[in-house]
């Protein structure tokens, strides 16, 4: 390639870069504190929680621990406010204080009115079996039509 073509190519690159930078999207984003959107989140995910097994704080203190054997199938039910936009539950995961332990259920449970339910098999990963009994908690995601996923926890 001749030197003349290299110079022309370099000038075109500089010109193109200048045009792109002058018409690019600004790099400043306006982020709002979550508190500004409390009503929006209530409308999307309002009341999304476990009704069985009971969510934290909804059972008497002497019944807080739910004892489940490895391999048991439990009936899990979720609730939401009547006007909440969460449409379906899409997962139920087993968690520890270290993070995700095992995805238990990744299907879809549609809300019928304000209730959704599923049968979920509780399976501890083989690596954790020697540590049983151990304290776990559940986490679920609920899906909205156009937006964020809602989540709820069942913990002790």
Image (cartoon, helix red, strand yellow):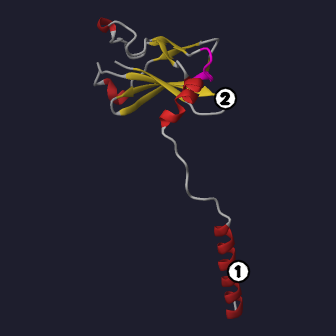
State the residue position of label 2.
145
Residue 125 appears in the picture as rendered: no
What residue sits 48% from the left and 17% below the top?
Answer: 121
Q: Is residue 73 above or below residue 131?
A: above
Using residue 53 as the reference point, say whether residue 62 is left or right of it: left
Which circle marks residue 67 in the picture? Answer: none
Q: Is residue 74 above or below residue 147?
A: above
**Quarter holding residue 66:** top left
Residue 143 x, y percent position in the rendering: 60, 27
What residue sits 57% from the left and 58% below the top?
Answer: 27
Q: Is residue 53 magenta?
A: no
- Mark 2: few, some, or many residues within 10 Å (few <14, many ≥20)? few
Residue 26 x, y percent position in the rendering: 60, 59
Residue 39 x, y percent position in the rendering: 55, 27
State the residue position of label 1.
12
Secondary structure beneath dot 1 equals helix
Secondary structure beneath dot 2 equals loop
What residue sits 53% from the left and 25% below the top?
Answer: 91
> Which of the image's four quarters has the N terminus?
bottom right
* Relative depth, front residue between 85 and 110: 85
**Quarter holding residue 96:** top left
Residue with the most extreme front position:
36
- The magenta span reads 82-90
- Mark 1: few, some, or many residues within 10 Å (few <14, many ≥20)? few
C-alpha distance separating marks 1 and 2: 46 Å
> Which of the image's four quarters has the C terminus?
top left
Q: Are marks 1 and 2 in contact (CB under 8 Å)?
A: no
Using residue 61 as the reference point, say whether residue 34 is left or right of it: right
Mark 1 or mark 2, which has the lower sequence index? 1
* Relative depth, front residue between 101 and 27: 27
């Amino acid at each position: 390639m001749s030197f003349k073509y290299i110079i022309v190519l370099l000038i075109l690159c500089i010109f193109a870069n200048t045009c792109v930078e002058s018409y690019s999207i600004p790099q400043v984003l306006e982020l709002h504190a979550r508190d500004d959107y409390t009503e929006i989140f209530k409308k999307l995910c309002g009341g999304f929680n476990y009704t069985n097994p009971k969510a934290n704080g909804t059972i008497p203190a002497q019944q807080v621990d739910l004892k489940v054997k490895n391999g048991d199938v439990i009936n899990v039910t979720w609730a939401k406010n009547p006007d909440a936009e969460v449409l379906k539950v899409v997962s139920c995961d087993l968690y520890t204080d270290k993070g995700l332990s095992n995805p238990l259920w990744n299907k879809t449970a549609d809300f019928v009115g304000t209730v959704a339910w599923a049968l979920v098999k509780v399976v501890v990963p083989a690596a954790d079996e020697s540590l049983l009994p151990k304290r776990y908690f559940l986490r679920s995601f609920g899906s909205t039509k156009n937006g964020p996923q809602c989540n709820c926890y069942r913990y002790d």
